[in-house]
């Protein structure tokens, strides 16, 4: 008989997706030039994509709240121009935690407001995200959790498959990936620079993180990885081409995404086959369907263990009851 266990989604809600959950060590930030107008800022809790140009600064994600001032200091080293846009790839606070402080330090490109008062029309950078991100961030806080400040909420959302903006001389595509890491994930594609910010759909240092409570699914992650591969073009017979900035981890290109997609697809097929055989969650765990990939992606401690991944994958792939 299978013992009752608390779904990994609720464990994740309590442990993973709260400010500081990925690590409590003081942040040491570094900036890596990528290509074109794009740099990658690491160490703030999540990777932050920085686009610099004549019109100002655009950021993809803002890291943890406690690192906001350090992020601003690094941005000022790159450009004295105002922060105009922040794009959030999804809802988790290691990607949205800095919104309030960093947006307040910016200036929106705006012409006015509904009251006709132009004095504060440009105050703060615009914060863009898929609608589900705003819905979740503005929902009542769970018991024992602090409410998200109003200044951290997205100021502009989209509900279609894509949203396009043109900034600093290049087109930028914000592309929704449904039911992947969460239900509000976006890729951000800088077309002239040929760089894609992938958020936590792609985290090359660990197994895919499936946030079941916030609408994530294992199949959705694989679908999104396949979309990411379609969007990238490798350099001929060399590393490079389209660069991919993951939510966490090293700068990557198409080959890295292909390797990660293949791993996820193989493990999905293994677990799905075990489910079809009628195996319980504990039996699937005991069969170790990730064994050959554990040296590269596995973990027994930390924010996302192999055991948590297998449980989330099992629950995501099991037929609905």
Image: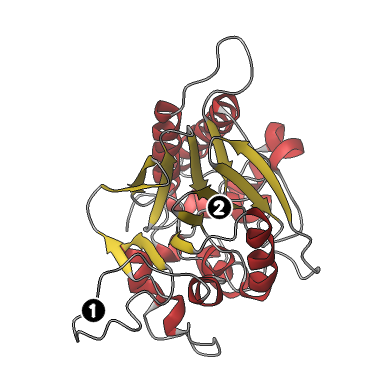
Contact? badges 1 and 2 (CB < 8 Å): no
User: Of callouts 1 and 2, which one flags the residue occurring earlier in the amino acid sequence?
Assistant: 1
Q: Is residue 306 above or below residue 123?
A: above
Q: Nearer the viewer, residue 30 or 82?
A: 82
Q: Which residue is mark 2?
A: 209
Query: Residue drawn 43% across and 74% down?
Result: 124
* Quadrant in the rendering for residue 44: bottom right
Residue 251 in percent (x, y) is at 64, 38
The residue at 50%/32% (across/down) is 265
Q: What kind of element bears circle 2?
A: loop
The correct choice, above or below, for 159 with respect to 242 in the image is below
Give the quarter of the image for residue 287.
top right
Residue 102 visible to an observer of this rendering:
yes
User: Is residue 5 among what the camera can see?
Assistant: no
Residue at the top extreme of this rendering:
237
Which residue is identified by label 1?
Answer: 113
Identify the colour scheme used. Answer: secondary structure
At 30% across and 68% down in the image, what residue appears? 110
107 to the left or right of 281: left
């Amino acid at each position: 008989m299978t013992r009752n266990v608390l779904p990994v989604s609720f464990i994740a809600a309590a442990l993973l997706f709260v400010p500081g959950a990925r690590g409590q060590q003081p942040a040491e930030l570094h900036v890596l030039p990528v290509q074109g107008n794009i740099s990658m800022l690491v160490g703030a809790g999540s990777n932050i994509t920085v686009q610099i140009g004549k019109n100002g600064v655009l950021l993809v994600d803002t890291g943890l709240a406690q690192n906001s001032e350090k992020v601003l200091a690094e941005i000022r080293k790159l450009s004295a121009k105002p922060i105009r846009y922040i794009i959030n790839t999804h809802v988790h606070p290691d990607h949205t935690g800095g919104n309030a402080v960093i947006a307040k330090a910016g200036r929106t490109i705006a012409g006015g407001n509904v009251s006709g008062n132009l004095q504060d029309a440009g105050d703060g950078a615009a914060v863009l995200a898929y609608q589900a991100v705003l819905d979740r961030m503005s929902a009542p806080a769970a018991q024992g959790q602090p409410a998200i400040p109003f200044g951290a909420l997205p100021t502009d959302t989209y509900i279609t498959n894509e949203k396009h903006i043109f900034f600093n001389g290049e087109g930028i595509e914000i592309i929704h990936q449904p039911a992947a890491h969460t239900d509000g994930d976006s890729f951000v594609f800088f077309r002239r620079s040929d760089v894609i910010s992938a958020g936590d759909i792609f985290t090359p240092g660990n197994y895919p993180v499936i946030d079941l409570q916030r609408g994530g699914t294992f199949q959705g992650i694989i679908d999104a990885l396949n979309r990411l591969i379609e969007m990238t073009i490798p350099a001929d017979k060399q590393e490079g081409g389209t660069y991919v900035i993951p939510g966490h981890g090293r700068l990557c290109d198409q080959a890295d995404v292909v390797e990660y997609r293949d791993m996820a697809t193989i493990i999905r097929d293994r677990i799905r086959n075990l489910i079809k055989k009628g195996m319980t969650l504990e039996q699937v765990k005991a069969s170790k369907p990730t064994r050959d990939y554990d040296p590269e992606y596995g973990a027994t401690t930390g924010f996302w263990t192999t055991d948590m991944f297998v449980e989330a994958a099992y629950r995501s792939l099991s037929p609905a009851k």
